[in-house]
Amino acid sequence: MATIDITKLRKVFGDENGEIVAVDDLDLTVEDGEFLVFVGPSGCGKTTTLRCIAGLEDVTSGTIEFDGRDVTDRRARERDVAMVFQNYALYPHMTVRKNIGFPLRLSTKQSSDEIDARVEEIAGLLGIDTLLEQKPRELSGGQQQRVALGRAIIRDPEVFLMDEPLSNLDAKLRSTMRTELQELQSELGVTTAYVTHDQTEAMAMGDRIVILEGGELQQVGTPSDVYRSPANEFVAGFIGSPSINAFTADVDGGLLTGPGGFEYALDDPSLVEGYDRVRVGVRPEDLRPEVDGAMPSEVTVVEEMGNENFLYARMGDVDLTARIESEIHPEEGVTVAFGFDEEDLYLFDPKTSESIKTKTSETDISYEQYVQPGPDQ
Ligand code: ATP
């Protein structure tokens, strides 16, 4: 097991046609035994960061330490990391037994019997002990993914690095494997860095989440931290599904006014002192239809999810989404005034996009309450 210290990590790709800063002065510590998830939009530098930790990519500058040992210039095979990728890369001609045992056959002097015993132990842990004599093509996607995990686990590494390992699986299996992987990681206690573009997966799995954008660290924190106290509007928009509703409002004393007749008098006007305008954010789950709510809106679509309804509405030129109880089912085309509690309101600096105010409500949130699986999950 290891603590990973990343200091001022920078990775620039480039040639005569220009340079791309894939990772920009990243400072980060992955704690011993932690499950840390990197998340962010495509191209934000997740995979490059992981490959630098693995030793598969030379860094431009900065250092990477495992338990205080500088490994920046060490090659991958000298780092004691095991990687699992989206592409399982199993050997098609080998049985499951041979696939899992392969790293040990390659790197240790253990006897065949010893290796077999270890393979059987790990296959038991992963629930694939009845498949040991099968070939990969005879297995389902989930079973193949377990074999790939087995091959990583058998090396007993200091660090697991996983890059979108579940994205080839269908929705149901992905959800099952998420739980299994988390349980396994906590049982083994191996420091794990995990990459995904899917914020639902990040929220569900991570002890802490690292949000990157354009190669820069936006925030690192627990799922609850990044949902409740996003550092900036980007994080607020990226975490939570459906996304936070956000728009610009004018400030007059403590009064906020905005598109489509939005009008809200802050209980605490000091929050916006010195601002002429602010960005306002309210999460879909914090909106509720009211008689005289701050956000007069025309309902455009109602989606019934069974346990709740999604209302899509327009407030002036702003599209809004609200998650409300399934009993409330307004007609499309009617006007609804959405209200919210000030403690759930987010405010962002319109120039820097940094948070001015985040959630202050006391509610103890579990991820299921606020993360709705997207259409492809
Ligand atoms: P995705 O979710 O799409 O995999 P990512 O967050 O993992 O994206 P990276 O693969 O780390 O992003 O890429 C970060 C940036 O670096 C991108 O702009 C990408 O085009 C660039 N990049 C990555 N690898 C190389 C390379 N080998 N040569 C040149 N540019 C690269």
Image (cartoon, helix red, strand yellow):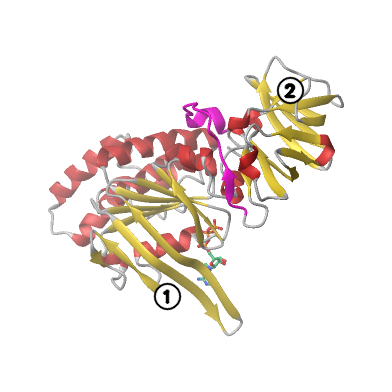
Amino acid at circle 1: Thr
**Which amino acid lies under the numbered mark 2 shown in the image of this protein?**
Pro
Examine the rendered structure and indicate whether residue 219 appears above or below residue 268.
below
Q: Position of residue 151 (x, y in %)?
A: 31, 50
Q: Please rate how many residues cluster around mark 1, counting C-alpha atoms within 10 Å: few if below 14, some from 14 to 19, many from 20.
A: some
Please provide percent x and percent y for residue 4. 30, 57
Give the main secondary structure, helix, strand or loop, of the magenta stretch.
loop
- Which residue is the site of mark 1? 60
Which of pointers 2 and 1 lies earlier in the amino acid sequence?
A: 1
**For the point 40% across and 74% down, which residue is it?**
61
Q: Residue at x 61, y 48 (%)?
A: 233
Indicate whether 299 appears above or below 65: above
Q: Position of residue 234 (x, y in %)?
A: 60, 50
Q: Residue at x 37, y 42 (%)?
A: 146
Q: Nearer the viewer, residue 346 or 310?
A: 346
Nearest the viewer among 375 and 207 is 207
Residue 28 numbered tag: none
The quarter holding residue 344 reads top right
As rendered, which of 322 and 136 lies closer to the eye?
322
Magenta span covers which residues?
353-371
Question: Can I make out residue 318 in this image?
Answer: yes
The residues tagged by marks 2 and 1 sit, at their Cα atoms, a distance apart of 53 Å
Residue 275 vs residue 213: left or right?
Answer: right
Query: Is residue 299 on the magenta stretch?
Result: no
- For residue 289, which numbered disc appears in the image? 2
Few, some or many C-alpha atoms within 10 Å of disc 2 (few <14, some 14-19, many ≥20)?
many
Q: Is residue 363 magenta?
A: yes
Give the side of residue 87 with respect to residue 348, left or right. Answer: left
Dot 1 falls on a residue whose secondary structure is: loop
| Residue at image point 49% right, 29% down | 365
